[in-house]
């Protein structure tokens, strides 16, 4: 079930203040805009959910992809990260070195095979002060993984995307044994629980975490120590923090790993219980009204306006609506094409040329579509930054 009014309590005036009309008039559209005050709010909120302990969070870097936001994560005290590409790992390694951080830890949470694996090993050699790791799901492959990389076993908890089937305890133990001293822990992403009601999500999450406890105990009984357990994207992160909160001083160390939370998006807000996250949209797309293909004629008669942010500016794989309009919530996004986003309204529409901020439905791949972002922050000059870790 979705929230009745997503972002109903959002202070829209703050966005107007940070991106005033005079600045909007100078920005070509469509354009990704990052609001650093909201980023810092989200970081502080997530750390509060973690009880103030940054060591309970290993945020996924796939969402944010740019140095100023990586730097904000590090400045907030976070030292453990996970990512999906070598580009993301490289950018974070550079940020950690630039801040003279020597206890950084980056897990490339993907079963790398081929040249990408060598690239990660080369990165580990280039940044020896950063602890780098990779996922593994094959006992035969574990000894052949580059010696500079730590090894986490990827467990399939029922999501059926990657990983060793959860019930294959002997296989999991064999991988840990083959990894030897480089074995760090278990990666257990319960992404299949994202569409449940809040109550069912909690019940199902407790079941999978309980099963994970059993697995850790089984490995321990075989003489295999598990240093760390990584779970949870955005939908279940609060459930994991609740479940493991009572075990925070017990081995193994548990960390959640949501990354979307740093930027937030409408899909996260709309899920049942999403408002409990307390997050603010921090990466929006500036777009303009370019056409009135079905002009407004009378009250109650639907009209259509078209914006210039289509599927090349907004990710569209996560369903509809692909975005929500910050300033005019009654505009409803219809199906986009590559360069166009038609929107329906039963009220008089904004004039042609009106700049509007769009909250993406799925912010992670939306960020990946942009080469540069405009970063705005209270008390600082707006600046253009490269989305340096986009693509592969």
Image: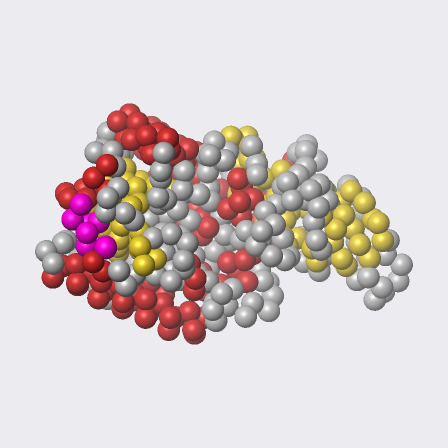
- Left or right: residue 68 versus residue 130 is right
**Residue 101 picture location, percent across and down:** 27, 34
Q: Residue at x 46, y 59 (%)?
A: 278
Q: Which residue is drawn at 19% across and 44% down?
A: 179
- Left or right: residue 316 versus residue 181 is right
Q: Residue at x 25, y 33 (%)?
A: 146
Q: Which residue is drawn at 27% across and 50% down?
A: 153
Examine the image and state in which quarter residue 248 appears: bottom left
**Residue 328 picture location, percent across and down:** 70, 55
Q: Is residue 275 magenta?
A: no
Judging depth in this view, the residue of 382 and 161 nearest the camera is: 161
Can residue 64 be seen from the camera position used here? yes
Judging depth in this view, the residue of 373 and 174 nearest the camera is: 174
- Left or right: residue 370 versus residue 62 is right
State the extent of the magenta-drawn residues as a range: 171-178
Which image quarter is the N terminus in? bottom right
Can residue 152 be seen from the camera position used here? no
């Amino acid at each position: 079930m979705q929230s009745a009014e997503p972002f109903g309590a959002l202070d829209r005036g703050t966005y107007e203040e940070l991106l005033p009309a005079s600045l909007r008039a100078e920005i070509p559209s469509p354009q990704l805009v990052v609001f650093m005050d909201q980023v810092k709010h989200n970081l502080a909120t997530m750390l509060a959910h973690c009880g103030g302990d940054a060591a309970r969070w290993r945020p996924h870097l796939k969402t944010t992809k740019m140095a100023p936001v990586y730097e904000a994560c590090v400045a907030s005290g976070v030292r453990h990260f996970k990512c999906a590409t070598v580009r993301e790992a490289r950018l974070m390694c550079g940020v950690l070195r630039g801040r003279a951080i020597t206890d950084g830890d980056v897990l490339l949470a993907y079963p790398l095979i081929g040249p990408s694996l060598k690239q990660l090993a080369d990165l580990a050699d280039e940044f020896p002060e950063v602890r780098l790791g990779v996922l593994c799901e094959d006992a035969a492959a574990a000894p052949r993984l580059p010696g500079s990389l730590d090894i986490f076993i990827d467990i399939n908890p029922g999501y059926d995307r990657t990983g060793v089937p959860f019930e294959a305890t002997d296989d999991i133990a064999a991988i840990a044994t083959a990894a030897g001293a480089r074995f760090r822990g278990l990666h257990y992403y319960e992404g299949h629980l994202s569409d449940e009601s809040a109550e069912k999500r909690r019940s199902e999450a407790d079941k999978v975490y309980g099963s994970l406890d059993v697995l850790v105990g089984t490995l321990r009984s075989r003489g295999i120590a598990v240093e760390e357990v990584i779970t949870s994207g955005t939908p279940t992160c609060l459930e994991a923090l609740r479940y493991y909160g009572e075990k925070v001083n017990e081995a193994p160390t548990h960390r959640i790993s949501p990354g979307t939370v740093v930027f937030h998006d409408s899909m996260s807000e709309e899920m049942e219980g999403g408002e409990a996250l307390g997050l603010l949209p921090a990466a929006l797309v500036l777009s303009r009204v370019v056409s009135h293909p079905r002009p407004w004629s009378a009250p109650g008669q639907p009209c259509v306006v078209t914006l210039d942010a289509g599927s090349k500016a907004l990710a569209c794989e996560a369903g509809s609506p692909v975005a929500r309009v910050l300033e005019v919530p009654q505009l409803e996004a219809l199906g986009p094409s590559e360069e166009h986003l038609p929107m329906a309204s039963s009220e008089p529409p904004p004039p042609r040329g009106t700049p509007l901020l769009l909250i993406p439905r799925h912010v992670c791949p939306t960020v990946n579509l942009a080469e540069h972002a405009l970063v705005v922050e209270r008390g600082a000059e707006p600046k253009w930054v490269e989305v340096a870790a986009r693509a592969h």
